Amino acid sequence: MAAREESANRVLRISQLDALELNKALEQLVWSQFTQCFHGFQPGLLARFEPEVKAFLWLFLWRFTVYSKNATVGQSVLNIQYKNDFSPNFKYQPPSENQKLWFAVCTIGGRWLEERCYDFFRSRRLASFGKVKKGMNFVVGLFKLCELMNFLIFLQRGKFATLTERLLGIHSVFCKPQSVREVGFEYMNRELLWHGFAEFLIFLLPLFNIQKLKAKLSSWCIPLTGAPSSDSTLASSGKECALCGEWPTMPHTLGCEHIFCYYCVKSSFLFDMYFTCPKCGTEVHSVQPLKSGIEMSEVNAL
């Protein structure tokens, strides 16, 4: 029963990694705010004691986070805290005082020692320090390799995100029990279905010739009684453009009795080389201006 409760309340891997990233972001923010306080002072004032100043700031954060609340800032945001893994009780047991102190030594002291040793060996290039430097590089590389192995184990088992947590026996648990949430997926499924249908229509509509389809529908709905081609018929149908419905500007014809604006018919013909008359369905072979024998004054007089 206890094992089931522990597996149900186990913190997700992504939550533990997010907590670590939040801790790093907070440290960068605190350090940037602190350095801005010395912006008006002599340049390089903090460079000499930078590792010690950083260690003091991280120790200050540790005092009011891990030491007092059993959780880092990132863990507090995500409702996570540390638990003593060595405790035989299944109930929550906070980390002991020794575990908290060693946590500060391993995290804060380890980073301070690494930065200080790097500055020390960089400023002193004597031959006597060559073997010591190689030994330190070997120790650091071995430690990084152990961190990599611990991270791979963490990805498999989801426990002990850092090597320090594994060595000290502390792992992340939820501060409050997580209640099972019932999520209804009906709305989500409906939205996904609608978006998929809309994308399908957006892909499909350009493949259809809308104007040709309208001409077909109009030819089925309005039966044709014939297609006279006399000049009087052209004059009677020349009061409006067959496409835009306005008075034809620079009237042109396709060879049928209907009149079009030059720009309307030309743009439609350039868009679709198989353009047909939307009124009668006549195929376009050539766009010709209206015959000079038919005066627009005669059309207007009708």
Image (spheres, rainbow, N blue to C red):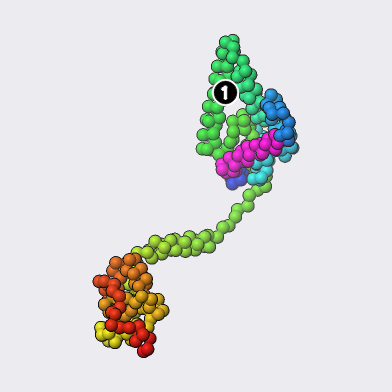
Task: Give yes or no for residue 28 being in the magenta stretch.
Answer: yes
Foreground of the two, 46 or 29: 46
Instruction: Say which residue appears at 29% left-offset and 72% top-offset.
Output: 287
In this rendering, position of residue 266 left or right of residue 107: left
In what quadrant of the picture does the C terminus appear? Answer: bottom left
In this rendering, position of residue 206 left or right of residue 166: left
Rendered location of residue 163, percent (x, y): 59, 30
Q: Quadrant of residue 221?
A: bottom left
In this rendering, position of residue 244 left or right of residue 40: left
Task: Give yes or no for residue 46 being in the magenta stretch.
Answer: no
Foreground of the two, 94 or 72: 72
Q: Quadrant of residue 2?
A: top right
Kind of residue indicated by mark 1: Val
Instruction: Say which residue appears at 38% left-offset and 78% top-offset.
Output: 248
Segment tinted magenta in the rendering: 10-36
Rendered location of residue 166, percent (x, y): 60, 31
Q: Give the vertical position of 238 relative to 122 (above or below).
A: below
Q: Quadrant of residue 129?
A: top right
